[in-house]
Image (cartoon, coloured by chain):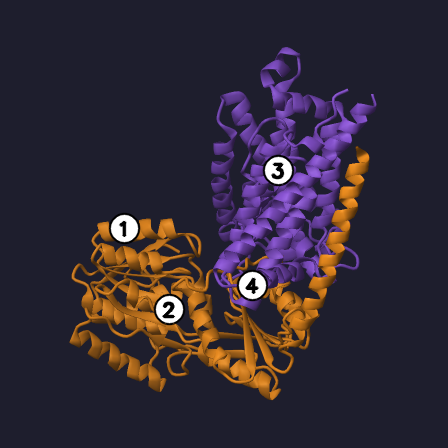
Amino acid sequence: MSDLVGRLDRRELLLGFAAAGALGALAAVRRAAAADKLIVGVIYVGPRDDYGYNQAQAQAAAALKKMPGLAVVEQEKVPETTDVQKTMGSMIEQDGATLLFPTSFGYFDPHILRMAEKYPKVRFAHCGGLWTEGKHPKNVGSYFGYIDECQYLDGVVAGHATKSKKLGFIAAKPIPQVLRNINAFSMGARTVDPKITTQLIVTGDWSLPIKEAEAANSLIDQGVDVITCHVDSPKVVVETAERRGIFVCGYHADQSALAPRGYLTGAEWSWTTPYTTHVKDALAGKPMNNFMRGGLKEGFVKTGAYGRAVSEPARKSADTVKAQMLKGDFVIFKGPLKDNAGKTVIAAGAAHKQTDVVLEQMNYLVEGVIGKV
Amino acid sequence: MASARDGQWRQAAEALVIPVAALAAAMVVFGVFMAALGQNPLEIYTLIYQGAFASAFSWQNTLARAAPLVLTALCVALPAQAGLMVIGGEGALVLGGLAAAVAGHLLSGVAPASVKVAMALAGMAIGAAWIALSGALRQYRGVNETISSLLLTYIAVALFNHFVEGPLRDPASLNKPSTAHIGDANMLGNLPGLDIHWGLGFGVVFCVAMYVLTRHTTYGFALRIVGGNPRAARLAGLPVTPIVLAACLLGGGAAGLAGAVEVAAVHGRANASLIAGYGYAGIVVAFIARQNPLAILPVAVLVGGLSASGGMLQRRLDLPDATVLVLQGIAFMLILGSEALYGRLKPFRPRAA
């Protein structure tokens, strides 16, 4: 009776101990294997193959793998909770990582800051540009790109492609980074024809595929014939546009394969540039580069190859502007500029270069955008 | 009379052996699956063990991931005692978190100890009210509580986003809309000596208290009668509606507390990071635990452990995150399926007198 139970428990216990011992020995062997290399950890908030934000980061991680003297460990779908702290900790404690790329914007405060304090010898490179001198630790760095340049160029191409003079923009949240993209896109298009409008739909969150598809369909039903977006994965928007037979500009990563007919061009990140800088600094033992930013000129962003549907005049005008941007003498946000309620937001004669922090507090939609912040 | 005691022992052994055997079977099936994909099952088992339980660090990793699930699982398990299938813990959690953030900010300057208590109470109160709403809809209007609690979660998330991005937004939170910070002094620290926040401690206390409440009090007895047969309970003169609502209040309070802890111990403010799916993960935990408040603890540790070792599999073998979902799926199906074995295995049957 209870004797049987007792025997069962003892046997299980013994088995458990034996298994634990064997596994522990194996663990020790595996850990010693990669001692002489720089271990780089990359953490993604979504799937690595999302055709969007995470894929853009994963492409840079893939480029790192080709560099000598380092090994890359990756973990995907890590939420912005204590999970990411434990994931960073695991990479440091269990994998021996000394350079981390926790890539989601929301990882920074409090997660990266807390771990950076706990592990002062580990470098944390974060995407988003939140690092502030004097406020944040020196083993944390941030990198970000001026992707509104590519959005402006997308706008120029879209402006040439549209027949209805109605463009559509699907955005996750009305925050400064997103507003800057919407405005740049709309301003680019209006250099082709000032009658062009951009209808904005805000979905409310970064990854809402059903809402994004609904928004795309509703825009197309309203006569929009070129669409673009700022959400984590543009996959659904691009596919919907292709199925409905309209044009589309991509975002984050290359989505041309999803829309062979309607894909015009795209605004893409080129994170290999900051990734390699951080790795080289770490390998050379140089202090961390805490603040890295750049646009087309610096190689932080790039435009997608033109699709079949892009006309010769469209290519020409976009390439002209791009050449100016590459030289560094093109200013997108300059006066006189009005918002879509008719209020002047940048006075005549004033010009905000890309590095101007005023642009990071953008809280308006420019003339030509239909929508509200 | 000796056989009654014997029966109890056998029942306890049954409740332990069946799920453990199901879990072992799941590991074997998963091993076969991984072998079919060209991986070495032994290496997989090693990594799972290493990731979740091999060292002090991996134990803390596991427990930290288990902590929020303990409280959200209670949000399912307590109403389930009364026969309600509430799956809206996520809504109670996010609103609880929002309430705690507001309380923490409004009371800045007050003694931190009282602020912490106020944040916990605010979170629990809102969470309790939110789940009680589902219970009331069912008791008074005959609305199915499973559907209503799920739909109320969507409303809760919409309300949460509205307040965080609108009236309660800290203007300094530019690209990540958040409420104002509660202040470092008001933050809940970690459990002494560990890198795990107080949510785990609250969860353990809550689970034990709820176990005692449901198994060793008259309210608990009445609650389980209502859960077994509400019409019989009503005929017996039990106040069914108050009993059901109390269970909802307690469950919602647990989920609300989970939200409050996320704000007070982790984020310091309410923002979209709070909507991480803990409420939904809690449903699975509660079902595997067969709605037993005490069994929630080991099950949450198991789920936390699988999540911790999932990271290990990703990093060492370059497997996708879906790998661990496959393991979880197999394990949960087998554990739930093994419920059919209760009372059917000879060694666990009480010997005829």
Q: Which residue in the protein does label 2 denote? A: A253
Q: Chain letter for purple? A: B
Few, some or many residues within 10 Å of mark 2 (<14, 14–19, 20+): many
Few, some or many residues within 10 Å of mark 3 (<14, 14–19, 20+): many
Question: Foreground residue, A52 or B175?
Answer: A52
* Label annotation for residue B75: 3
Which of discs 1 and 3 lies nearer the camera? The answer is 3
The span from disc 4 to disc 2 (Cα, nearest Å) is 34 Å
Count every numbered label the image shows and give the total: 4
Amino acid type of the residue that numbered disc 1 sits on in the rendered structure: Asn
Q: Are marks 4 and 1 in contact (CB under 8 Å)?
A: no
The answer to which of marks 2 and 1 sits earlier in the sequence is: 1
Placement of B278 over or under B74, stated as above or below: below
Residue at horizontal 27%, vertical 52%? A219
Q: Are marks 4 and 1 on the same chain?
A: no
Amino acid type of the residue that numbered disc 4 sits on in the rendered structure: Asn
Amino acid type of the residue that numbered disc 2 sits on in the rendered structure: Ala
The answer to which of marks 3 and 4 sits earlier in the sequence is: 4
Q: Are marks 2 and 1 in contact (CB under 8 Å)?
A: no
Amino acid type of the residue that numbered disc 3 sits on in the rendered structure: Cys
The span from disc 3 to disc 2 (Cα, nearest Å) is 41 Å
Q: Are marks 4 and 2 in contact (CB under 8 Å)?
A: no
Dot 3: what SS? helix
Q: Are marks 3 and 2 on the same chain?
A: no
User: Where does the image place residue B135, in percent across and percent down from the top left?
Assistant: 56, 28
* Label annotation for residue B40: 4
Q: Which residue in the protein does label 1 denote? A: A217
Dot 4: what SS? loop
Dot 2: what SS? loop
The span from disc 3 to disc 4 (Cα, nearest Å) is 39 Å
